[in-house]
Image: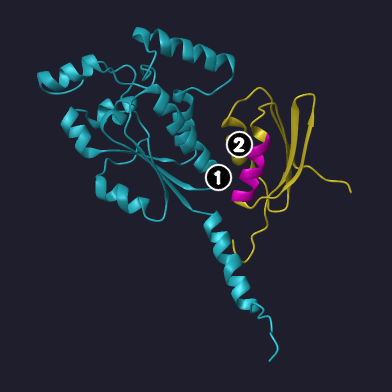
Chain colours: A yellow, B cyan
């Protein structure tokens, strides 16, 4: 499966809560269904991104880690019946 | 007589899902910021900006000591009478002049804390406050505290909401996650 990424954010070095805040701001620019990838080094970002995705309903498509750099792919939610 | 298992009707199952989804998405966050100490103001601003990032309608109601961090950093003496003036001398306002609740060491503690924060790329209270305003967090000063402590609207930073009272804060807190920090 190939994934088209609409936006890429380099948030390496930032600490809580900045990775989430920068990502939330960037997601506002996206159209529903578009994907964003985020690179972060904050170890707390793994549980934070998971929780943020769950709380906001924007699916977290992928989480991976390579040598201390986390890579997240998020998809902007489609506007459903339940909003 | 045979025992039959009663299955949940589909509508009830749907209603349950809906309730679960609603519970997950509390729409509002209201923080009562009572303390003016660095180690409480910092988490207050972290939670407020994060709440906004999570799509919650976020309000911070600044009351009592919590109001002093909103004083402009370059405003030194506030108040009309000697008691209010003395208060501002003893308790300098501004988000760059906050004290720690422990290990303050006459200002050395906060200075070291800010140094560590820079080293670890943690946003300062000043940056978080700017970020909160950008993200539409409502920052509401308590009118009664302003009167009591002699803080005028022009002593406080720009970008705040209109000063309000306890009723407004509690009305806003209905159905919200509420924190008292």
The tag on residue A20 is 2
Provide the chain ID for the residue under circle 1: B
Single out the residue that lies furthest toward the front.
B1
Looking at the image, residue B30 lies above or below residue A71: below
The answer to whether mark 2 and mark 1 are in CB contact below 8 A is: yes
Q: CA distance from mark 2 to mark 1?
A: 8 Å
- Where residue B157 sits in the image (x, y, percent)? 34, 28
Provide the chain ID for the residue under circle 2: A
Q: Which residues are magenta?
A: A46-55
- Is residue B66 found left or right of A46 in the rendered image? left
In the rendered image, the quadrant that contains the C terminus of chain B is: top left
- Where residue A82 sits in the image (x, y, percent)? 60, 64
For the point 25% across and 32% down, which residue is it? Answer: B64
For the point 25% across and 50% down, which residue is it? Answer: B167
For the point 54% across and 54% down, which residue is it? Answer: B25
The tag on residue B54 is 1
């Amino acid at each position: 499966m190939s994934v088209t990424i609409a936006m890429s954010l380099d948030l390496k070095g930032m600490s809580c809560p900045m990775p989430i805040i920068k990502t939330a701001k960037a997601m506002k620019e996206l159209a529903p269904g578009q994907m964003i990838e985020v690179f972060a080094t904050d170890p707390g970002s793994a549980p934070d991104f998971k929780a943020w995705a769950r709380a906001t309903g924007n699916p977290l498509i992928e989480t991976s880690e390579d040598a201390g750099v986390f890579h997240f792919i998020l998809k902007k939610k489609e506007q459903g019946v339940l909003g | 007589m045979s025992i039959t298992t009663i299955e949940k009707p589909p509508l009830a199952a749907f209603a349950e899902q809906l309730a679960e989804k609603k519970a997950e998405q509390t729409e509002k966050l209201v923080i009562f910021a009572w303390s003016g100490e660095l180690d409480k103001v910092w988490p207050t601003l972290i939670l407020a900006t994060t709440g906004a990032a999570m799509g919650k309608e976020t309000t911070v109601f600044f009351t009592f000591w919590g109001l002093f961090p909103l004083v402009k950093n370059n405003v030194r003496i506030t108040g009309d009478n000697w008691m209010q003036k003395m208060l501002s001398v003893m308790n300098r306002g501004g988000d760059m002049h906050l004290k720690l609740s422990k290990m303050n060491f006459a200002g050395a503690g906060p200075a070291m804390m800010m140094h560590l924060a820079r080293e670890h790329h943690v946003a300062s209270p000043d940056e978080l406050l700017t970020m909160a305003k950008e993200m539409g967090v409502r920052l509401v000063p308590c009118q009664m505290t302003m009167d009591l402590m002699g803080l005028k609207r022009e002593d406080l930073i720009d970008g705040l909401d209109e000063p309000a009272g306890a009723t407004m804060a509690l009305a806003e807190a209905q159905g919200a996650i509420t924190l008292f920090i």
